[in-house]
Amino acid sequence: MGDAIKILAIDIGGTHLRAVAIDEAGTILHRAIASAEPLRDGNPIAVLTEFIQRAQDAVGGELAGAAIGAPSILDSSRRGIVRSPNLPAFEGPGIADALEAACGIPVLLDHDATLQTRGEAEHGSAAGRDLVLGVYFGTGVGGAFIDHGRLMGGIYRMQLGHVPLRGDGRVGTGGGVDCVEAYASGAVLQALAVAHGVAVATLFSQPSEGGLAAALQTFVHDQALTMALAMTLTDPEIVVIGGGVTEMAGYPFDELVRQTNQCLSPVLGRGLRPIVRATLGPAAASWGALHLIRDALSRRQATPPTPLLSVTR
């Protein structure tokens, strides 16, 4: 590759934008955080352009590229966004092209869960594995499956939070009825905390009884069903679990693993695939971005006539 490169990762969450610039050794060169509200109500291209340009200035204008992890469904070219329920103003074609034109550097789009899973497969708890399933329980539920560094399937692949789960008639954050997010997401915990008059941060760390205790047990079981479903469909070598829910104080991670294996069919074998915590935290997106940009630049050098970002799937 020649000279070491510096890249920017932008992680778009439900409430915040987080940007981290790193070099190839993982050294953090710049970090910034801002509200995601302007992406909902304002001009997302202008907001992200300012974010990228600020990072460029911070590292002396030496960024080799930027990768944006969005909680959205990307188009087949991975240059625009087809659907973004929480950030509808972010939808549209050619978003990456517009950002490249404004900022003068390569810009790539990736699904947020995919970018994190790339990072864990590159440098985290799944390093050295070829078939990596990542599942993230946060405000919503996200998933990604990396097969020898590549994503398999069409644009709606691994929309795990929108897979049907049970039949109680609950509505999920994206509007789907009886989808995974209606039963196994952080939004469910928020509702439980309000209903029982407790702080959401203490749901797993403080003793509970009666209806709340039963509801939390059901919640973890629904997460286990979700995990077993994703594992059955992808047959991974390793499963990486992340997201704010599983990082809550007192969260019963070992119980989640036990119940997930119990939910798997004995035909597939139980306890054969490691289920581990994500270890990189917010840094996962940065390592995933580095991998993505480095790969795209290498491919462009190998085949100069090919547009840079047509090969990032």
Image (spheres, rainbow, N blue to C red):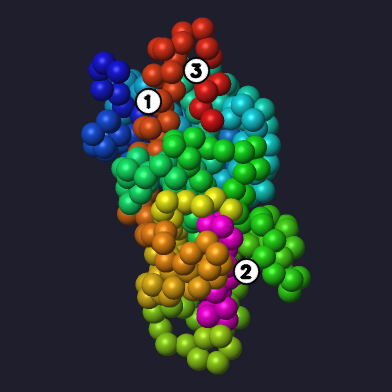
Q: CA distance from mark 1 to mark 3?
A: 11 Å
The residue at which mark 3 appears reads as 308
Magenta segment main secondary structure: helix
Closer to the N terminus: mark 3 or mark 2? Answer: 2
Q: Is residue 5 left or right of residue 171?
A: left
User: Which mark identifies residue 183?
Assistant: 2
The stretch in magenta equals 215-232
161 or 32: nearer the viewer: 161
Q: CA distance from mark 1 to mark 2?
A: 38 Å
The answer to whether residue 162 is above or below residue 310 is below
- In this orientation, does residue 140 appear? no
Q: Is residue 29 magenta?
A: no
The residue at which mark 1 appears reads as 294
Number of other residues with Cα within 10 Å of mark 1, as a class: few under 14, some 14 to 19, many 20 or more: some
- Tag 1 near tag 2, CB within 8 Å: no
Number of other residues with Cα within 10 Å of mark 3, as a class: few under 14, some 14 to 19, many 20 or more: some
Q: Is residue 37 left or right of residue 258?
A: right
Looking at numbered disc 1 in the image, what kind of residue is underneath it?
Arg
Q: Position of residue 102 (x, y in %)?
A: 51, 20
Q: Position of residue 159 (x, y in %)?
A: 62, 49
